[in-house]
């Protein structure tokens, strides 16, 4: 019978891949906590209506995994986390002290076409600052992203944070004769600019109901790299970002508008400098989302970063961590039946002393046991047989240099700990 393949768009995390995921999570946790953010989690399942109001038709109708539960409600595997965050804040709005600084790292599902840098199931870092409506809050969120880039070894020559402002963009679009009710269509068009040829983009604009002249005007606006100076919010944002030490990573880019409908102010995306990958992270200001899901108005800003694309960039930049650490510090080997129970007792005693210990599950020939330890990068092997039990001294072999000594049983913990600390 052929092996059953995994579900399309999902990943198997073998130990090496899991080690990288944990390494990235550790970096995310360290950076988040260094800015004073607290970790939270939300359900993996949410009612579809939570996303229907503000996440946009593409996310809800095309990308969400949706199914009816037995009660008839439409349920979605969460395709993003910000609406869940807004719902949680709305539920306890009166009791939560301001500002609210929260972060999370967990699974997200989107029914997209799997390709390089994109999967249907991925892990996402979300970090948000709520209860503050200021450019300085937006700059802090950008500085958090920059801190993560530095923590994983990505310099400004490798990755950039591209910034725009939706209010500024709205003013510019309205000046082209685009009606206010057409602004969502204009934002969708601009969000697709780097995904289409000029002709496809023009045709898509007309499909959205925009005049050809308006589409041409948008194309000209997207070439203006100094337009940020007309926005007091962006001027204050860049000043604060410089004070936070993040300026070298930042660039104004009028093509960045974000596709989700709930953004209200400054928005940003991280892209690799070579332009070979899709967006690495994206986010911005959303001041009305908490009230849209039933709470008081609580302004917010934040971003989300998936693990797939940042992983590719870290690998390409040669910044990935080395081989994962071994699963154990020492392998307890036993070479004859008389040593079976004593080897189990010894392994247990070493674990209780705080050591990471693996016990070989059968009395194989010693060379085979030692070969296994070497392949698993376990640095030490404790060898127990009838002679060792009789003498009360066990053979301790250092597989890194091949040396071997006899150690009294009562001194094993101190001797092993000493060798481990020398690694």
Image: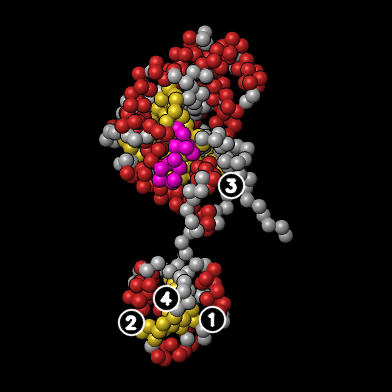
Q: Residues within 10 Å of mark 4 (few under 14, many from 20)?
A: many
- As drawn, 149 above or below 341: above
What mark, if any, has residue 410 been given in the picture?
2
- Reading the image, the residue beneath label 3 is 10
Task: Tell me whether circle 4 and circle 3 mark residues in contact (CB < 8 Å).
Answer: no
Task: Tell me whether circle 1 and circle 2 mark residues in contact (CB < 8 Å).
Answer: no
Q: Earlier in the sequence, mark 3 or mark 2?
A: 3
Q: Residues within 10 Å of mark 2 (few under 14, many from 20)?
A: few
Residue sitting at 55 percent across and 31 percent down?
59
Mark nearest the camera among 1 and 3 is: 1
Mark nearest the camera among 3 and 2 is: 2
Q: CA distance from mark 1 to mark 3?
A: 40 Å
Q: Earlier in the sequence, mark 2 or mark 4?
A: 4
Q: Residues within 10 Å of mark 1 (few under 14, many from 20)?
A: some
Q: Earlier in the sequence, mark 1 or mark 3?
A: 3
- Reading the image, the residue beneath label 4 is 347
- Reading the image, the residue beneath label 1 is 366
């Amino acid at each position: 019978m052929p092996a059953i393949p995994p579900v399309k768009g999902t990943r198997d995390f073998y130990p090496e891949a899991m080690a990288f995921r944990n390494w990235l999570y550790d970096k995310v946790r360290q950076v988040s906590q260094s800015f004073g953010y607290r970790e939270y989690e939300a359900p993996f399942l949410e009612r579809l209506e939570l996303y229907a109001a503000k996440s946009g038709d593409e996310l809800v109708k095309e990308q969400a995994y949706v199914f009816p539960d037995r009660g008839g409600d439409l349920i979605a595997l969460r395709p993003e986390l910000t609406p869940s965050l807004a719902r949680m804040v709305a539920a306890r709005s009166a009791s939560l002290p301001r500002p609210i600084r929260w972060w999370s790292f967990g699974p997200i599902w989107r029914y997209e076409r799997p390709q390089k840098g994109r999967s249907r199931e991925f892990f996402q870092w979300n970090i948000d600052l709520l209860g503050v409506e200021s450019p300085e809050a937006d700059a802090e969120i950008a500085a958090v992203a920059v801190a993560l880039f530095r923590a994983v070894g990505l310099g400004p020559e490798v990755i950039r944070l591209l910034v725009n402002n939706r209010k500024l963009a709205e003013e510019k679009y309205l000046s082209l004769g685009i009606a206010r009710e057409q602004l969502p269509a204009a934002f969708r068009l601009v969000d697709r600019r780097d995904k289409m040829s000029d002709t496809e983009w023009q045709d898509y604009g007309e499909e959205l109901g925009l005049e050809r002249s308006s589409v041409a005007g948008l194309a000209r606006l997207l070439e203006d790299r100094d337009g940020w100076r007309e926005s007091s919010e962006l001027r204050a944002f860049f000043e604060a970002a410089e004070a936070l030490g993040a300026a070298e990573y930042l660039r104004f880019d009028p093509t960045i508008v974000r596709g989700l409908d709930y953004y209200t102010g400054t928005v940003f995306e991280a892209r690799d400098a070579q332009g070979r990958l899709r967006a690495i992270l994206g986010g911005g200001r959303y001041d009305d989302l908490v009230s849209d899901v039933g709470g008081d108005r609580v302004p917010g800003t934040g971003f989300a970063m998936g693990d797939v694309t940042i992983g590719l960039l870290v690998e390409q930049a040669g910044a990935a961590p080395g081989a994962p650490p071994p699963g154990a510090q020492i392998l307890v080997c036993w070479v004859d039946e008389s040593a079976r129970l004593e080897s189990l007792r010894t392994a247990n005693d070493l674990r209780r002393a705080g050591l990471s210990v693996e016990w070989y599950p059968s009395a194989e020939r010693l060379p085979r046991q030692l070969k296994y330890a070497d392949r698993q990068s376990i640095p030490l092997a404790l060898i127990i047989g009838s002679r060792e039990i009789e003498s009360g001294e066990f053979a301790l072999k250092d597989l890194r240099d091949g040396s071997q000594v006899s150690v009294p049983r009562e001194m094993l913990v101190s001797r092993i700990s000493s060798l481990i600390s020398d690694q």
